[in-house]
Amino acid sequence: MERLTVDVVRGQARQPLVRDLSLAIRPGEMLALVGESGSGKSITAGAVLGLLPSSLRIGEGRIRFRGEEISAWPDKRKRRLRGKEIALVFQDYQGSFTPFMKVGKQLVEAVRSHVRITYGEAKELALHWLNEVDLPAERVFGSYPFQLSGGQRQRAALAAAMLLQPKLLIADEPTTALDVLTGERVLDLMTKLRRQTGCAILFISHDLRLVLKRADTVAVMQGGRIVECGRADTMRRQAAHPYTRLLLESRPLLLRDPGTGRAAEPDKPLQLVP
């Protein structure tokens, strides 16, 4: 993305919601876009996918994917890109699957809508990816979504996103609706799949703890703008922008490093504060 602006259109008036945004994600990299609700994170993802609501428009800037400028592509061409080259994992795992169709049928249809293969080949591919996300593949393939737990549905959604080995995976708050342990497991699987396939991940989150622990690069968004962008390890210790420092300071600090008495880093030995 280069100097991207997204406007809300009301009649003849246009008001920018995302302003002058520039980001680049390399193959195999996880870039986290972090900020409070309403900062423009999901709008940015929608612009990349070509899924903005009818009231929003890209005003200025460019979105380049694998060397091509895609923001001006017609909807039909963008649909061919979604799912095959760019995939999405939603925040709401309950909305990832149609409730009245078995998971396996939906996975097979997703594959065959992009690639000309037989039903048997598509089923084999679906079972492979269900196995990759540590699910009992045959049982999940033959289950309706309501027969799975929330964590299982989110992992099945991750399998669906990875079916065609996309070059870019957009994970929009993928753990918000899950408990902590299940969320960590989903993120572990995302990391594993990224290493296996070399896909880039745009990880959207409001949870700075997860961002600093998982991402290679962090972009902090406030009021529709990127206010700071840098390596996660550097930002954890040397955040430059006041808003980033405010986000860091707002993290719960219930633990201390036993050696220094200071608030501990996420990867250091911890002990409870007396």
Image (spheres, rainbow, N blue to C red):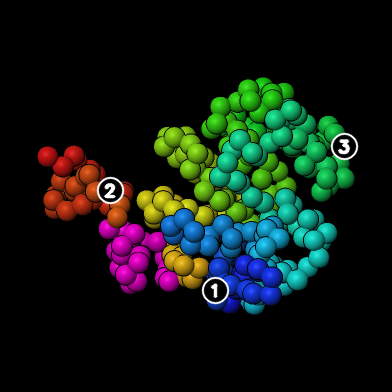
Which span of residues is magenta-colored? 227-249
Q: Is residue 216 at least partly visible in the picture?
A: no
Taking the view exactly as shown, the residue that stands out farthest to the front is 11
Q: Which residue is mark 3?
A: 118
Please rate how many residues cluster around mark 3, counting C-alpha atoms within 10 Å: few if below 14, some from 14 to 19, many from 20.
few
Looking at the rendered structure, the kind of residue marked 3 is Thr
For the point 59% across and 60% down, the residue is 43
Up-down relation of residue 233 to residue 142 (above or below): below
Callout 2: helix, strand or loop? Answer: loop
| Location of mark 2 (residue) | 252
The residue closer to the viewer here, 4 or 132, is: 4
- 201 vs 8, nearest the viewer: 8
Judging by the rendered image, the residue that carries numbered circle 1 is 19
Check residue 18 for magenta coloring.
no
**Type of residue at label 1?**
Arg
Give the image location of residue 121, x and y in percent: 82, 36
Q: Is residue 163 above or below residue 11?
A: above
Number of callouts: 3
User: Which circle's residue, 1 or 2, is located before the other in the chain?
Assistant: 1
Q: Earlier in the sequence, mark 2 or mark 3?
A: 3
- Residue at screen point 37% across, 51% down: 209
Q: Is residue 246 above or below residue 197?
A: below
